Amino acid sequence: MNILQRIKCVFGHHERDRTRVRYCDDVFGSVCAGCGKRMVRRDRSWSVEQA
Ligand SMILES: [Zn+2]
């Protein structure tokens, strides 16, 4: 858990955890370094995966 990143999450700026990037189903997936939400890479940028 990254405290600085956690604060950014509160403001909606999530960032993927570089150490937990995985490739599956033709997309790169990871989790937010602050809050742990699932993230996916689309069009060269990362976004929180919508449930
Ligand atoms: Zn987050």
Image (cartoon, grey):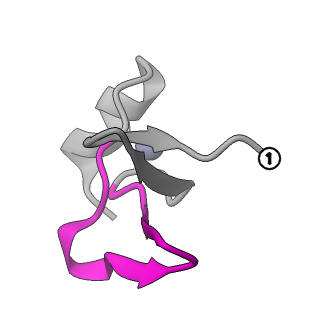
Amino acid type at mark 1: Ala
The picture quadrant where one finds residue 11 is top left
User: Which residue is painted at 45% across and 39% down in the image?
Assistant: 47
The correct choice, above or below, for 40 with respect to 26 in the image is: above
Residue 14, percent across and down?
37, 37
| Residue furthest front as drawn | 26
User: Which residue is painted at 31% across and 29% down in the image?
Assistant: 8
Q: Quadrant of the N terminus?
A: bottom left
Q: Looking at this view, is 3 or 43 the one in front?
A: 43
Residue 51, percent across and down?
80, 46
The quarter of the image that holds ligand 1 is: top left
Q: Which residue is mark 1?
A: 51
User: Which residue is painted at 34% across and 38% down in the image?
Assistant: 43
Residue 19, percent across and down?
21, 79
In the image: residue 10, left or right of residue 2: right
Q: How many labels were placed on the picture?
A: 1
Give the residues in magenta.
Answer: 15-33
In the image: residue 50, left or right of residue 3: right
User: Is residue 27 highlighted in magenta?
Assistant: yes
In the image: residue 20, left or right of residue 25: left
Q: Is mark 1 within 8 Å of ligand 1?
A: no
